[in-house]
Image: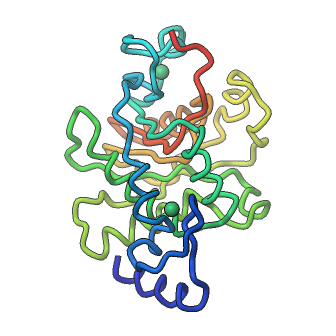
Amino acid sequence: MRVNRIISFIHEYLFPARCAICQTVLLDIDEAVFGLCADCASLFAIPTQKRCALCGRFLASEQTYCAECRNEKTPHSFDRVICLYPYTGRYRQLLTAYKFGEKVAVGNFLAQKIIEASALFPEPLAKPFLVPVPPRQGKIKGCGWDQVEYLAHSLERERRYGAAAVPPVKRCLKRLLSQTQKHLNSRQRKANLAGRILCTAAAPQQAILFDDVYTTGSTMESCAAALKKGGADQVYGICLFHTELKENT
Ligand SMILES: [Zn+2]
Ligand SMILES: [Zn+2]
């Protein structure tokens, strides 16, 4: 985190940062690095609520799988995904500040959560690689930056400057031109992405995909399918946020 700290220090000196949640001016360098005051950061411990054992979304019932995963006709290509936060309330506020408010420091905080989550899979992974979900072509042009790629950079910095437990990042997926997914339903999303995500290098045997939001799971699914086709044995996933499950029984 040394480089992060120096960059943040200079930046903070010139433009004092504010907490992404409560807007307090951040005078502490550790807080500035993460874009959150200590009090607000403490609100984002990874919830321990029961999750679907496959897609990782929160469950309201004591079932093992959510209704969507139970009713799925074709098996998923990923072995298991963990979603960290619901996309509501303060969690939504955090992602909005990062993604649309361009509070990039929050990305360093979210990268820490990805590291934390990579240790949460029930089966310990021997030699995993972190694989970012590639952006839709034209996305960077449209919104100026790639939020998932920023997380990848932050994870690499963490690994380079001492956190040996951070798995290496491998960018081996590419997304071909496809429509924006925003207004498509689950079936349309799957069709839209079919064959549009490719593995452009040898896939790691154990991959942990990471993305910002899990909506219908079609992006995770297409990425996992491409990785398995590229030679991966196990594909796990971490999504920072998930949109609400329609049916929670
Ligand atoms: Zn705060
Ligand atoms: Zn599920």
Q: Nearer the viewer, residue 224 or 244?
A: 244
Residue at position x 53%, y 32% from top? 221
* Whole-percent x, y for residue 182 in the image: 76, 38
> Percent from the top left, x then y, of residue 215?
62, 33
Which residue does the image show at 34% across and 33% down from the upper left?
A: 48
Q: How many marks?
A: 0
Identify the residue at image location x=38%, y=58%.
Answer: 112
Relative placement, left or right, of 128 versus 97 is left
Left or right of 65, for residue 122: left
Which of the two residues, 159 or 201, is positioned nearer the viewer here?
A: 159
Q: Position of residue 171 (x, y in %)?
A: 48, 58
Who's the residue at 73% across and 33% down the image?
192
Q: Please, is residue 2 above or below residue 150 in the view? A: below
Q: Nearer the viewer, residue 140 or 232?
A: 140
Residue 184 position by quadrant: top right
| Chosen colour scheme | rainbow
* Side (left or right) of 189 relative to 64: right
Camera-side residue of 199 and 116: 116
In this rendering, is residue 218 above or below 66?
A: below
Where in the figure is residue 114, as x and y percent of width and height? 39, 51
Quarter of the N terminus within the rendering: bottom left
